[in-house]
Image: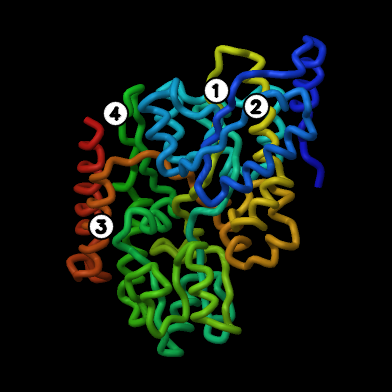
Amino acid sequence: MKKKLAVVLMAGALAAAMGMSAYADEIKVWVADNVVGFTEEQIEAFKEANPDFAGYDYLVEPVGEGDAAGNMITDVEAGADIFVFAQDQIARLVSAGALEEVAPDNEEAVKTENDAGAVAAATVGDILYAYPLTSDNGYFLYYDKSVISDPSTLEGILAACEEAGKNFYMEINSGWYQTAFFFGTGAELTYETDDDGNFTACNTSYASDAGLLALREIVELKASPSFQNGSAVGEATNCAAIVDGTWDSGAAQDLFGDNYACAKLPTFEGSDGKQYQMSGFGGFKLLGVKPQEDEDKLMACDALAAWLSSGDVQLARFDAVGWGPSNLEAQKSDAIQADAALSALAEQLQYTIPQGQYPGEYWTLATSLGDSVISGELTVDSSDDELMDALTKFQDTCISYAE
């Protein structure tokens, strides 16, 4: 696999032509604590390969993707020049002026070399604002292949679990997992924010035929004698299948042993007789570059960002700390293909949407909707009108959070 670093070579040649072989400026990089050492090693490799940028002082600080965006927004000037952040923070960062657009010479490579979900997560409007780093946050199916021979349909999975007297786990009272059904049928729920991060609009179609199909399927799932509400392998008992994420891959391997297997989420047959692919949220780590007054420093930052997000470095990062790559060639590597969980997630992420920003109240509201199914308030015997009434109340409340 070859690194696509034309921008680095171009920038190096330009810097040399300008007689700028050394720089006194500092480039500050924020990454999670567990990749500080790895990042420092990669910067040394970058400097060796690109001596025209070696004169900068590169400072790597342990600021994780969960904190980076908040810190950048609080004080952009004092923040990092290059930083890793979670994709749901990109709109806030753009509004705060904390993200430079991806360098034009890098844009085509980013779009063609990374999976579509990661590219969408790095884009606001029509503008690419970040370099994709990972495609490894989402959920898929872990299952016992001695019980389930075909994990392609939810109906088949439940039938196999019921026949074997085993449990199927999914957390239907979670606003994160719940979207697998609603987004799968085509229902929408997204929010827009202003420059200050305030929610200004809610785009939702839960109170619709698509939403009704999704909620009807959730109550059908709850009616299965094999259904258990949950999403943590460590808390599952008598389990043959569970919807969970890569963070539980070790526990899932321990649970299922030689029968450990993974797959994308299944399809399900809606009450209209049509098949729907379960969807949901996808999560990605992105690498951002802060706007710079010094064009030469910006050129160096973009070159380093291209290096750190390249396919070879993504694969090396997987080997070092297990982060799943967004680079398409890296995803095809033997190491990734041998990782059943990451392979299943990569397939599932093709059907998801990047998680944006949602009001804190949304998560509580979604829990209440799921709880109404778990408690038996909404059941398979509920009429379409009753289910639509619940969806209308849910939708109206979601809209109220942006008013």
Q: Earlier in the sequence, mark 4 or mark 2?
A: 4
Residue shown at 81%/19% (left/top)? 13
Name the residue beneath numbered marker 1: 100
Dot 4 amino acid type = Asn
Q: Nearer the viewer, residue 190 or 65?
A: 65
User: Could you say which quadrant of the image residue 173 lies in?
Assistant: bottom left
Dot 2 amino acid type = Asp
Percent position (x, y) of residue 304?
A: 67, 31
| Circles 1, 2 touching at the beta carbon (< 8 Å) | yes
Percent position (x, y) of residue 25?
A: 61, 20
Name the residue beneath numbered marker 2: 302
Q: Residues within 10 Å of mark 4 (few under 14, many from 20)?
A: some
Which numbered mark, 4 or 2, is in the foreground of this view?
2
Specify the label residue 198 is tagged with.
4
Which numbered mark, 4 or 1, is in the foreground of this view?
1
Element carrying mark 4: loop
Q: Residues within 10 Å of mark 3 (few under 14, many from 20)?
A: some
Dot 3 amino acid type = Thr
Element carrying mark 2: helix
Q: Earlier in the sequence, mark 1 or mark 2?
A: 1
Look at the image and name its color scheme.
rainbow
Percent position (x, y) of residue 300?
A: 67, 24
Dot 1 amino acid type = Glu
Which numbered mark, 1 or 2, is in the foreground of this view?
2
Name the residue beneath numbered marker 3: 367
| Circles 3, 4 touching at the beta carbon (< 8 Å) | no
Residue shown at 20%/58% (left/top)? 386
Q: Earlier in the sequence, mark 3 or mark 2?
A: 2
